Every structure is written in structure tokens, then in C-alpha cells.
């Protein structure tokens, strides 16, 4: 058997070169300007909530999830519960905010303007959210709600098909806007467009309002509480970090 003798000097030089290469890769991942995984990490994305009507609310890390901001605004009498009347009033308020020409329907330009307003949020930016307009008068009620066809609850028909609400806390891959809401809808306002004509009438909005409330009112007591509302997929992801 042949014995190979390696000089001490050569071995030391080889180890030195190897350690230097490793240190270079750790610091720059082998490429100039690459991020250092051991360096400071970017700040977490601000918490984002999309209300059942599509309104964006953005919070601050470490604070209550911004769904509480929406809930407090919708709870007109601040009794800790949102009735159908209050839910409906919140929806009509936001509809009026989007209906910039005041004709009682959302046309293609108004829908496109709304979608553009969400781009910053979908790319991880955005701005602090909040109520989109003054609270409107309360009207309507629970009349007729018990007869709502719940087979289309959470429907997003703009793509020609039906989509059920996402399982609680389970992301479905439709993007940040979808995962920030209760129903996993990438286009929450346009989801009310049941005849897929790229417009949302007041009647379609009212029908969607009933569907959305009925979907969230799981115990059928005619009111919503913050404690019984589902957590959104984004909220679940943040809680796991």
C-alpha cells in the first residue's frame, strides 16, 4: 500500500483558501450585491384587512388586526355587535364612495379605479386604511334574509364560475388581496357582478350584502361579533411568525 505524505505547509494553505471561499459565500451568497441572510431582515409587511365590501384597512405591527377597525366603524351604536342594518349601512356607504358619478351603479371606469387603488397593497405597500366615506342612513333589516339562497355564498362570478369561501385561515393562492379578506376573493367588489356585465348595480350590491352577512352570521342570530368572525389567511400567517 502506498502512503502519500502531504506537506504541512501545503495543507495549511489549502485550508486557508477553503475557509476564505466559504466566508465569501456566506457574506454575499456567491454573487456581488446579494442579500446577506445573516444580516438585518426587512420589516414585516403591515397588517392588511379587506372588508366584506372590499374596503382596505391597514394596521401597524403589534397592534390588533385591522379587521377590528372595520368592525368598530360598522358598529354604529358601539354595542359590540354588528346587526344586518349596520352591516348594510356600511356597505351602502362604501358603494357610494366608489360610485363617483352618483348614478347608483359601478361602471367599468369606477371598478377599474378601485382595482388600481389596491395595487399598492397587493405589492406589499399601501397606505393606512380606514373608512372610505361618511356613514349613511340606516335602512332595510333582516326581512327576507332567511330566504336567501346560500348556495352562492362567497360567489366570485367574474371569471365565469363559482367559488366557495376559503376554509378559515387557509391561503388559497389568489394573492394578497384575496388572503386579506374573509371570502378569498381577488376582486371583492366585482364579485357582486352576478350577471358578469362588468358593472355592479345597486340591486346586485344589495343581494351581495345579504349573501356576505348570511355567510358570516354562522349562528344565525342576526348579528356579528368580532370574536366570532373568522381570521383571514393573512392574519393566520402573521400569527404563526
Image: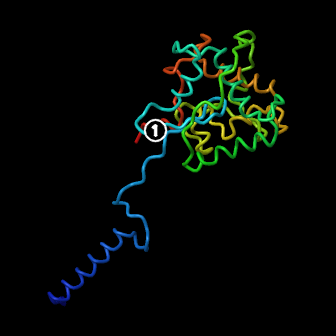
**How many numbered circles are shown?**
1
Asked if residue 96 shows in the view, the reply is yes
Determine crowd level at label 1: few under 14, some 14-19, many 20+ residues with C-alpha closer than 10 A: some
The furthest residue to the left? 8
Residue at (76, 41) in percent of width and height = 159
Of 5 and 111, which appears nearest the observer? 111
Of 59 and 18, which appears nearest the observer? 59
Quadrant (top left, top right, bottom left, bottom right) of the N terminus? bottom left
Q: Which type of secondary structure does the marked residue at label 1 adopt?
A: loop
Quarter of the image for residue 133 reads top right
Residue at (76, 37) in percent of width and height = 161
Of 160 and 221, which appears nearest the observer? 221
What percent of the width, then of the height, locates residue 23? 30, 72
Q: Is residue 143 above or below residue 13?
A: above
What percent of the width, then of the height, locates residue 187? 69, 39
Residue at (19, 90) in percent of width and height = 2
Quadrant (top left, top right, bottom left, bottom right) of the C terminus? top left
Q: Is residue 102 above or below residue 81?
A: below
Residue at image mark 1? 60
Of 192 and 95, which appears nearest the observer? 95
Q: Is residue 13 above or below residue 82?
A: below
Asked if residue 3 shows in the view, the reply is no
What percent of the width, then of the height, locates residue 230? 53, 26
Residue at (42, 33) in percent of width and height = 63
Quarter of the image for residue 41 reads bottom left
Q: Is residue 117 left or right of residue 2?
A: right
Q: Is residue 167 above or below residue 34?
A: above
Q: Is residue 95 left or right of residue 24?
A: right
- Give the colour scheme of this rendering: rainbow
What percent of the width, then of the height, locates residue 52? 64, 29
Amino acid at each position: 500500500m502506498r502512503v502519500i505524505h502531504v506537506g504541512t505547509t501545503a495543507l495549511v494553505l489549502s485550508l486557508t483558501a477553503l475557509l476564505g471561499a466559504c466566508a465569501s459565500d456566506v457574506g454575499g451568497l456567491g454573487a456581488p450585491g446579494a442579500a446577506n441572510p445573516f444580516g438585518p431582515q426587512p420589516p414585516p409587511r403591515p397588517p392588511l384587512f379587506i372588508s366584506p365590501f372590499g374596503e382596505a384597512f391597514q394596521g401597524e405591527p403589534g397592534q390588533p388586526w385591522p379587521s377590528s377597525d372595520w368592525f368598530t366603524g360598522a358598529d354604529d351604536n358601539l354595542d359590540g355587535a354588528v346587526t344586518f342594518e349596520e352591516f348594510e349601512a356600511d356597505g351602502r356607504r362604501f358603494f357610494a364612495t366608489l360610485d363617483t358619478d352618483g348614478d347608483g351603479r359601478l361602471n367599468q371606469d369606477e371598478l377599474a379605479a378601485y382595482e388600481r387603488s389596491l395595487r399598492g397593497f397587493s405589492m406589499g405597500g399601501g397606505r393606512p386604511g380606514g373608512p372610505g366615506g361618511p356613514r349613511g342612513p340606516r335602512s332595510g333589516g333582516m326581512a327576507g334574509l332567511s330566504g336567501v339562497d346560500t348556495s352562492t355564498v362567497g360567489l366570485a362570478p367574474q371569471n365565469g364560475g363559482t367559488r366557495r369561501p376559503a376554509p378559515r385561515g387557509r391561503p388559497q393562492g389568489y394573492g394578497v388581496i384575496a388572503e386579506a379578506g374573509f371570502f378569498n376573493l381577488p376582486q371583492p367588489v366585482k364579485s357582486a357582478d352576478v350577471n358578469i356585465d362588468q358593472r355592479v348595480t345597486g340591486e346586485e350590491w344589495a343581494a351581495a350584502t345579504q349573501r356576505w352577512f348570511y355567510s358570516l352570521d354562522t349562528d344565525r342570530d342576526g348579528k356579528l361579533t368580532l370574536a366570532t368572525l373568522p381570521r383571514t389567511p393573512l392574519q393566520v400567517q402573521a400569527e404563526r411568525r
